[in-house]
Image (cartoon, rainbow, N blue to C red):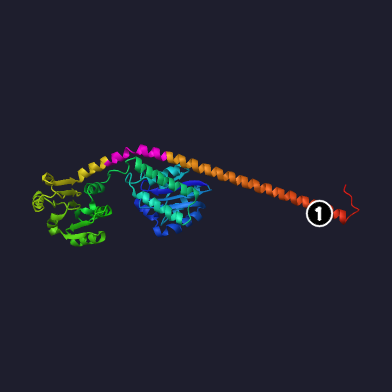
Amino acid sequence: MKLFAAGLSHKTAPVELREQLGVKQSEIVDLAFALKSFGHLGEIVLLSTCNRVEIYGTTRQAMGHIKALLQLLCAEPRDLDPHIYLYEGASAVRHLLRVAAGLDSMVLGETEITGQIKNAYEIARNAGLTGRVLNRLFQRAFQATKEIRTRTGIGRGTVSIKSTAVELIGRTDLSQQSIMVLGAGAMAENCVRLLVKKGAKSIFISNRSFDRALDLAMRCGGEAVCFGYCLFEMRDVDVVIAATSSAETLLGRDDVENLMKARRNRPLLLIDLSVPRNIDPAVGGLENVALHNIDNLEALARAGLRNRERELATCYKIIDAHVQALVEKLDSESERIHSLDRVHASSLASHHIAEQEETTCCVVNVAREFKHTVLPSYTEP
Protein backbone atom coordinates (compact mmCIF):
# COMPACT_ATOMS: atom_id res chain seq x y z
CA MET A 1 0.00 0.00 0.00
CA LYS A 2 1.29 3.47 -0.92
CA LEU A 3 0.52 6.40 1.37
CA PHE A 4 -0.47 9.76 -0.15
CA ALA A 5 -1.77 13.21 0.78
CA ALA A 6 -3.53 15.34 -1.83
CA GLY A 7 -5.37 18.63 -1.62
CA LEU A 8 -5.39 22.37 -1.99
CA SER A 9 -5.09 25.15 0.58
CA HIS A 10 -4.98 28.91 1.09
CA LYS A 11 -1.43 28.77 -0.27
CA THR A 12 -2.45 27.26 -3.62
CA ALA A 13 -6.09 28.24 -4.25
CA PRO A 14 -8.26 31.36 -3.78
CA VAL A 15 -11.12 31.31 -1.30
CA GLU A 16 -13.80 31.15 -4.04
CA LEU A 17 -12.30 27.88 -5.28
CA ARG A 18 -11.87 26.43 -1.77
CA GLU A 19 -15.53 27.20 -1.10
CA GLN A 20 -16.57 25.03 -4.04
CA LEU A 21 -14.71 22.02 -2.64
CA GLY A 22 -15.73 22.51 0.99
CA VAL A 23 -17.52 19.54 2.55
CA LYS A 24 -20.18 19.79 5.27
CA GLN A 25 -19.49 17.75 8.40
CA SER A 26 -22.74 15.83 7.89
CA GLU A 27 -21.60 14.72 4.41
CA ILE A 28 -17.99 13.75 5.14
CA VAL A 29 -18.56 10.04 5.79
CA ASP A 30 -20.71 9.45 2.69
CA LEU A 31 -18.30 11.37 0.46
CA ALA A 32 -15.29 9.58 1.94
CA PHE A 33 -16.86 6.19 1.18
CA ALA A 34 -17.60 7.35 -2.38
CA LEU A 35 -14.01 8.56 -2.87
CA LYS A 36 -12.62 5.35 -1.41
CA SER A 37 -14.69 3.23 -3.79
CA PHE A 38 -14.08 5.38 -6.87
CA GLY A 39 -10.34 5.66 -6.21
CA HIS A 40 -9.87 2.02 -5.14
CA LEU A 41 -8.35 3.21 -1.86
CA GLY A 42 -7.51 1.01 1.10
CA GLU A 43 -7.94 3.74 3.73
CA ILE A 44 -9.05 7.38 3.68
CA VAL A 45 -9.40 10.48 5.88
CA LEU A 46 -11.14 13.52 4.39
CA LEU A 47 -10.22 16.91 5.90
CA SER A 48 -12.25 20.04 5.06
CA THR A 49 -11.69 23.45 6.70
CA CYS A 50 -12.08 27.04 5.53
CA ASN A 51 -8.40 27.11 4.51
CA ARG A 52 -7.86 23.61 3.05
CA VAL A 53 -9.47 20.49 1.60
CA GLU A 54 -7.27 17.37 1.76
CA ILE A 55 -7.45 13.62 1.23
CA TYR A 56 -5.12 11.29 3.12
CA GLY A 57 -5.21 7.71 1.94
CA THR A 58 -3.54 4.50 0.82
CA THR A 59 -3.70 2.79 -2.55
CA ARG A 60 -2.10 -0.08 -4.47
CA GLN A 61 -2.50 1.74 -7.77
CA ALA A 62 -0.42 4.40 -9.49
CA MET A 63 -0.99 7.95 -8.25
CA GLY A 64 -2.22 9.30 -11.57
CA HIS A 65 -5.89 9.10 -10.61
CA ILE A 66 -5.65 10.73 -7.17
CA LYS A 67 -6.09 14.33 -8.36
CA ALA A 68 -9.31 13.28 -10.09
CA LEU A 69 -10.76 12.45 -6.66
CA LEU A 70 -10.65 16.12 -5.68
CA GLN A 71 -12.42 17.02 -8.89
CA LEU A 72 -15.38 14.96 -7.63
CA LEU A 73 -15.74 17.33 -4.69
CA CYS A 74 -15.92 20.44 -6.87
CA ALA A 75 -19.39 21.95 -7.15
CA GLU A 76 -18.84 22.80 -10.82
CA PRO A 77 -16.32 21.81 -13.51
CA ARG A 78 -12.99 23.59 -12.91
CA ASP A 79 -9.38 22.95 -13.84
CA LEU A 80 -7.96 22.13 -10.43
CA ASP A 81 -4.56 20.78 -11.50
CA PRO A 82 -2.67 24.09 -11.04
CA HIS A 83 -3.95 24.31 -7.45
CA ILE A 84 -3.55 20.70 -6.24
CA TYR A 85 -0.52 19.31 -4.41
CA LEU A 86 0.20 15.60 -4.13
CA TYR A 87 2.65 14.02 -1.68
CA GLU A 88 3.67 10.36 -1.44
CA GLY A 89 5.32 8.26 1.26
CA ALA A 90 7.59 10.18 3.63
CA SER A 91 6.60 13.50 2.00
CA ALA A 92 2.94 12.80 2.82
CA VAL A 93 3.86 12.06 6.44
CA ARG A 94 5.89 15.27 6.69
CA HIS A 95 3.05 17.31 5.19
CA LEU A 96 0.46 16.10 7.71
CA LEU A 97 2.80 16.65 10.65
CA ARG A 98 3.46 20.24 9.54
CA VAL A 99 -0.23 20.93 9.01
CA ALA A 100 -1.21 19.44 12.40
CA ALA A 101 1.37 21.59 14.21
CA GLY A 102 0.09 24.78 12.57
CA LEU A 103 3.26 25.30 10.51
CA ASP A 104 1.31 25.39 7.23
CA SER A 105 -1.49 27.64 8.55
CA MET A 106 -2.37 31.17 7.52
CA VAL A 107 -1.47 32.20 11.09
CA LEU A 108 1.81 30.48 11.92
CA GLY A 109 1.55 28.19 14.93
CA GLU A 110 -2.23 28.46 15.39
CA THR A 111 -3.81 25.59 17.31
CA GLU A 112 -7.32 25.38 15.83
CA ILE A 113 -6.16 23.14 12.95
CA THR A 114 -5.02 20.44 15.40
CA GLY A 115 -8.56 20.05 16.71
CA GLN A 116 -9.98 20.03 13.18
CA ILE A 117 -7.61 17.23 12.16
CA LYS A 118 -8.46 15.21 15.28
CA ASN A 119 -12.15 15.57 14.46
CA ALA A 120 -11.66 14.49 10.82
CA TYR A 121 -9.61 11.46 11.93
CA GLU A 122 -12.14 10.38 14.57
CA ILE A 123 -14.98 10.60 12.05
CA ALA A 124 -13.06 8.39 9.60
CA ARG A 125 -11.92 5.92 12.28
CA ASN A 126 -15.42 5.52 13.74
CA ALA A 127 -16.77 4.91 10.23
CA GLY A 128 -14.20 2.14 9.62
CA LEU A 129 -12.41 4.13 6.92
CA THR A 130 -8.94 3.89 8.48
CA GLY A 131 -6.61 0.98 9.09
CA ARG A 132 -3.06 0.20 10.15
CA VAL A 133 -1.33 2.89 8.06
CA LEU A 134 -3.55 5.93 8.67
CA ASN A 135 -4.08 5.06 12.33
CA ARG A 136 -0.33 5.11 12.89
CA LEU A 137 0.08 8.25 10.73
CA PHE A 138 -2.46 10.37 12.59
CA GLN A 139 -1.41 9.18 16.04
CA ARG A 140 2.16 10.13 15.12
CA ALA A 141 0.97 13.57 13.96
CA PHE A 142 -0.67 14.22 17.33
CA GLN A 143 2.45 13.04 19.18
CA ALA A 144 4.69 15.32 17.12
CA THR A 145 2.37 18.29 17.65
CA LYS A 146 2.36 17.74 21.40
CA GLU A 147 6.16 17.59 21.46
CA ILE A 148 6.41 20.79 19.37
CA ARG A 149 4.02 22.64 21.68
CA THR A 150 5.98 21.46 24.72
CA ARG A 151 9.52 22.05 23.48
CA THR A 152 9.11 25.23 21.39
CA GLY A 153 7.38 28.59 21.54
CA ILE A 154 5.70 28.27 18.14
CA GLY A 155 2.27 28.90 19.65
CA ARG A 156 3.24 31.57 22.15
CA GLY A 157 2.64 35.27 21.78
CA THR A 158 0.32 36.79 19.18
CA VAL A 159 0.73 37.38 15.47
CA SER A 160 -2.47 39.22 14.52
CA ILE A 161 -3.77 42.64 15.51
CA LYS A 162 -7.04 41.35 16.98
CA SER A 163 -5.38 38.56 18.97
CA THR A 164 -2.77 41.03 20.23
CA ALA A 165 -5.57 43.32 21.43
CA VAL A 166 -7.28 40.42 23.20
CA GLU A 167 -3.99 39.39 24.78
CA LEU A 168 -3.56 42.91 26.18
CA ILE A 169 -6.99 42.60 27.76
CA GLY A 170 -6.50 38.99 28.82
CA ARG A 171 -3.44 39.57 30.96
CA THR A 172 -5.99 39.27 33.71
CA ASP A 173 -8.99 36.91 33.71
CA LEU A 174 -11.26 37.95 30.82
CA SER A 175 -14.30 36.50 32.55
CA GLN A 176 -13.84 39.07 35.31
CA GLN A 177 -13.58 42.07 32.98
CA SER A 178 -16.27 44.33 31.60
CA ILE A 179 -15.63 45.37 27.97
CA MET A 180 -17.32 47.91 25.69
CA VAL A 181 -16.95 47.67 21.91
CA LEU A 182 -17.68 50.74 19.81
CA GLY A 183 -18.84 49.58 16.37
CA ALA A 184 -20.93 46.77 14.93
CA GLY A 185 -19.25 46.08 11.59
CA ALA A 186 -17.06 43.18 10.50
CA MET A 187 -14.03 44.28 12.52
CA ALA A 188 -16.10 44.80 15.67
CA GLU A 189 -17.85 41.46 15.22
CA ASN A 190 -14.54 39.62 14.82
CA CYS A 191 -13.31 41.22 18.05
CA VAL A 192 -16.47 40.34 19.95
CA ARG A 193 -16.36 36.72 18.77
CA LEU A 194 -12.71 36.41 19.74
CA LEU A 195 -13.43 37.90 23.17
CA VAL A 196 -16.26 35.44 23.73
CA LYS A 197 -14.05 32.57 22.60
CA LYS A 198 -11.40 33.63 25.12
CA GLY A 199 -13.89 33.66 27.98
CA ALA A 200 -15.27 37.22 28.18
CA LYS A 201 -18.66 37.28 29.91
CA SER A 202 -19.58 40.99 30.10
CA ILE A 203 -19.55 42.71 26.68
CA PHE A 204 -21.38 45.93 25.79
CA ILE A 205 -21.81 46.93 22.15
CA SER A 206 -22.51 50.51 21.11
CA ASN A 207 -23.06 51.81 17.60
CA ARG A 208 -24.65 54.83 15.91
CA SER A 209 -27.22 52.40 14.52
CA PHE A 210 -28.76 50.83 17.64
CA ASP A 211 -30.41 48.11 15.53
CA ARG A 212 -27.02 46.90 14.31
CA ALA A 213 -25.63 46.98 17.85
CA LEU A 214 -28.63 45.00 19.08
CA ASP A 215 -28.30 42.45 16.27
CA LEU A 216 -24.60 41.83 17.04
CA ALA A 217 -25.29 41.68 20.78
CA MET A 218 -28.03 39.08 20.30
CA ARG A 219 -25.83 36.94 18.05
CA CYS A 220 -22.80 37.07 20.35
CA GLY A 221 -24.38 37.14 23.79
CA GLY A 222 -23.59 40.79 24.55
CA GLU A 223 -25.67 43.79 25.60
CA ALA A 224 -26.51 46.69 23.27
CA VAL A 225 -26.01 50.28 24.44
CA CYS A 226 -27.42 53.44 22.81
CA PHE A 227 -24.55 55.43 21.32
CA GLY A 228 -25.62 58.59 23.14
CA TYR A 229 -25.24 56.83 26.50
CA CYS A 230 -21.94 55.02 25.85
CA LEU A 231 -19.86 57.54 27.86
CA PHE A 232 -22.19 57.10 30.81
CA GLU A 233 -21.86 53.29 30.61
CA MET A 234 -18.05 53.56 30.35
CA ARG A 235 -17.90 54.55 34.00
CA ASP A 236 -18.20 50.88 34.97
CA VAL A 237 -16.19 49.06 32.27
CA ASP A 238 -12.54 48.00 32.35
CA VAL A 239 -11.81 48.13 28.63
CA VAL A 240 -13.06 50.13 25.63
CA ILE A 241 -12.34 48.92 22.08
CA ALA A 242 -13.02 51.28 19.18
CA ALA A 243 -13.57 49.37 15.93
CA THR A 244 -15.59 51.54 13.57
CA SER A 245 -15.30 52.93 10.05
CA SER A 246 -16.07 56.44 11.26
CA ALA A 247 -13.66 59.21 10.23
CA GLU A 248 -14.50 61.17 13.38
CA THR A 249 -12.88 61.21 16.81
CA LEU A 250 -15.34 59.44 19.07
CA LEU A 251 -13.40 59.83 22.32
CA GLY A 252 -11.58 63.14 22.85
CA ARG A 253 -9.22 64.09 25.65
CA ASP A 254 -11.92 66.10 27.46
CA ASP A 255 -14.36 63.19 27.22
CA VAL A 256 -11.94 60.76 28.80
CA GLU A 257 -10.70 63.27 31.38
CA ASN A 258 -14.28 63.77 32.64
CA LEU A 259 -14.84 60.01 32.46
CA MET A 260 -11.83 59.30 34.66
CA LYS A 261 -13.15 61.75 37.29
CA ALA A 262 -16.45 59.87 37.32
CA ARG A 263 -14.51 56.59 37.63
CA ARG A 264 -12.44 58.06 40.51
CA ASN A 265 -9.35 57.41 38.42
CA ARG A 266 -9.92 53.65 38.26
CA PRO A 267 -7.55 52.29 35.50
CA LEU A 268 -8.98 52.19 31.97
CA LEU A 269 -7.58 50.34 28.96
CA LEU A 270 -8.40 51.89 25.56
CA ILE A 271 -7.73 50.00 22.30
CA ASP A 272 -8.22 51.84 19.01
CA LEU A 273 -8.42 49.48 16.02
CA SER A 274 -9.92 52.10 13.71
CA VAL A 275 -8.31 53.81 10.74
CA PRO A 276 -8.68 56.80 10.90
CA ARG A 277 -8.27 56.67 14.66
CA ASN A 278 -11.41 57.12 16.77
CA ILE A 279 -9.63 57.95 20.03
CA ASP A 280 -7.63 61.17 20.43
CA PRO A 281 -3.92 60.21 20.86
CA ALA A 282 -3.65 62.86 23.60
CA VAL A 283 -5.79 60.59 25.79
CA GLY A 284 -2.74 58.40 26.33
CA GLY A 285 -1.17 61.09 28.48
CA LEU A 286 -3.90 60.94 31.13
CA GLU A 287 -3.20 59.28 34.46
CA ASN A 288 -4.33 55.64 34.77
CA VAL A 289 -5.27 55.52 31.07
CA ALA A 290 -3.48 53.04 28.78
CA LEU A 291 -4.05 53.68 25.06
CA HIS A 292 -3.00 51.33 22.25
CA ASN A 293 -3.64 52.17 18.60
CA ILE A 294 -3.29 49.99 15.53
CA ASP A 295 0.38 50.92 15.00
CA ASN A 296 1.27 49.72 18.50
CA LEU A 297 -0.63 46.49 17.95
CA GLU A 298 0.98 45.87 14.54
CA ALA A 299 4.44 46.26 16.09
CA LEU A 300 3.58 43.77 18.83
CA ALA A 301 2.12 41.34 16.27
CA ARG A 302 5.25 41.55 14.08
CA ALA A 303 7.45 40.87 17.10
CA GLY A 304 5.30 37.85 17.94
CA LEU A 305 5.61 36.52 14.39
CA ARG A 306 9.41 36.92 14.43
CA ASN A 307 9.57 35.01 17.70
CA ARG A 308 7.53 32.16 16.22
CA GLU A 309 9.62 32.06 13.05
CA ARG A 310 12.75 31.57 15.17
CA GLU A 311 11.22 28.31 16.43
CA LEU A 312 10.70 26.84 12.95
CA ALA A 313 14.12 25.15 12.68
CA THR A 314 13.52 23.25 15.93
CA CYS A 315 10.00 22.33 14.83
CA TYR A 316 11.28 20.92 11.55
CA LYS A 317 13.91 18.82 13.34
CA ILE A 318 11.25 17.33 15.61
CA ILE A 319 9.05 16.57 12.61
CA ASP A 320 11.88 14.96 10.62
CA ALA A 321 12.66 12.65 13.56
CA HIS A 322 9.00 11.58 13.77
CA VAL A 323 8.81 11.10 9.99
CA GLN A 324 11.85 8.81 10.00
CA ALA A 325 10.55 6.81 12.96
CA LEU A 326 7.12 6.32 11.40
CA VAL A 327 8.42 5.42 7.94
CA GLU A 328 10.79 2.84 9.45
CA LYS A 329 7.94 1.43 11.55
CA LEU A 330 5.59 1.14 8.57
CA ASP A 331 8.31 -0.38 6.37
CA SER A 332 9.17 -2.92 9.07
CA GLU A 333 5.53 -3.87 9.52
CA SER A 334 4.99 -4.14 5.77
CA GLU A 335 8.03 -6.40 5.41
CA ARG A 336 6.82 -8.58 8.28
CA ILE A 337 3.35 -8.82 6.72
CA HIS A 338 4.87 -9.70 3.32
CA SER A 339 7.09 -12.33 4.95
CA LEU A 340 4.10 -13.88 6.65
CA ASP A 341 2.24 -13.81 3.34
CA ARG A 342 5.17 -15.57 1.63
CA VAL A 343 5.37 -18.20 4.39
CA HIS A 344 1.63 -18.70 4.20
CA ALA A 345 1.75 -18.99 0.41
CA SER A 346 4.67 -21.44 0.64
CA SER A 347 2.83 -23.49 3.25
CA LEU A 348 -0.25 -23.60 1.06
CA ALA A 349 1.85 -24.67 -1.92
CA SER A 350 3.58 -27.43 0.10
CA HIS A 351 0.26 -28.60 1.44
CA HIS A 352 -1.13 -28.67 -2.11
CA ILE A 353 1.86 -30.71 -3.37
CA ALA A 354 1.53 -33.14 -0.47
CA GLU A 355 -2.16 -33.54 -1.24
CA GLN A 356 -1.32 -34.21 -4.89
CA GLU A 357 1.31 -36.80 -3.95
CA GLU A 358 -1.06 -38.48 -1.53
CA THR A 359 -3.77 -38.53 -4.18
CA THR A 360 -1.33 -40.01 -6.72
CA CYS A 361 -0.28 -42.72 -4.29
CA CYS A 362 -3.89 -43.57 -3.60
CA VAL A 363 -4.65 -43.78 -7.30
CA VAL A 364 -1.62 -46.05 -7.93
CA ASN A 365 -2.51 -48.33 -5.03
CA VAL A 366 -6.12 -48.58 -6.13
CA ALA A 367 -5.00 -49.32 -9.67
CA ARG A 368 -2.62 -52.03 -8.52
CA GLU A 369 -5.27 -53.60 -6.34
CA PHE A 370 -7.71 -53.47 -9.23
CA LYS A 371 -5.20 -55.19 -11.53
CA HIS A 372 -4.45 -58.00 -9.07
CA THR A 373 -8.05 -58.69 -8.14
CA VAL A 374 -10.06 -58.00 -11.26
CA LEU A 375 -7.37 -58.76 -13.86
CA PRO A 376 -5.27 -61.58 -12.33
CA SER A 377 -3.76 -62.49 -15.70
CA TYR A 378 -2.31 -59.01 -16.14
CA THR A 379 1.40 -58.65 -15.43
CA GLU A 380 3.22 -55.39 -15.14
CA PRO A 381 5.80 -54.72 -17.79
Query: Would you say residue 85 is visible in this rendering?
Result: no
Q: Nearer the viewer, residue 132 or 15?
A: 132
Left or right of 1, for residue 304: left
Q: Looking at the picture, how far across and down is residue 319, in whole percent?
A: 41, 40
Q: Looking at the picture, how far across and down is residue 336, in whole percent?
A: 56, 43
Q: Looking at the picture, how far across and down is residue 122, in whole percent?
A: 42, 54
Q: Which residue is mark 1?
A: 366
SS under mark 1: helix
Q: Are there few (<14), some (14-19), or many (20+) residues within 10 Å of tag 1?
A: few
- Which residue is depicted at the point 43% across and 52% down? 121
Left or right of 225, for residue 88: right
Is 319 in the magenta? yes
Q: How many marks?
A: 1
Where 301 falls versus 259 (above or below)? Answer: above
Left or right of 249, for residue 166: right
Q: Looking at the picture, how far across and down is residue 158, in whole percent?
A: 27, 44
Q: Nearer the viewer, residue 105 or 70?
A: 105
Name the kind of residue labelled 1 in the image. Val
Q: Which segment did they paint magenta? A: 304-320
Is 325 in the magenta? no
Q: Nearer the viewer, residue 258 or 189?
A: 258
Where 278 falls versus 91 (above or below)? Answer: below
Q: Nearer the viewer, residue 23 or 159?
A: 159
**Predominant SS along the magenta part:** helix
Query: Would you say residue 336 is visible in this rendering?
Result: yes
- Which residue is depicted at the point 29% across and 41% down? 305
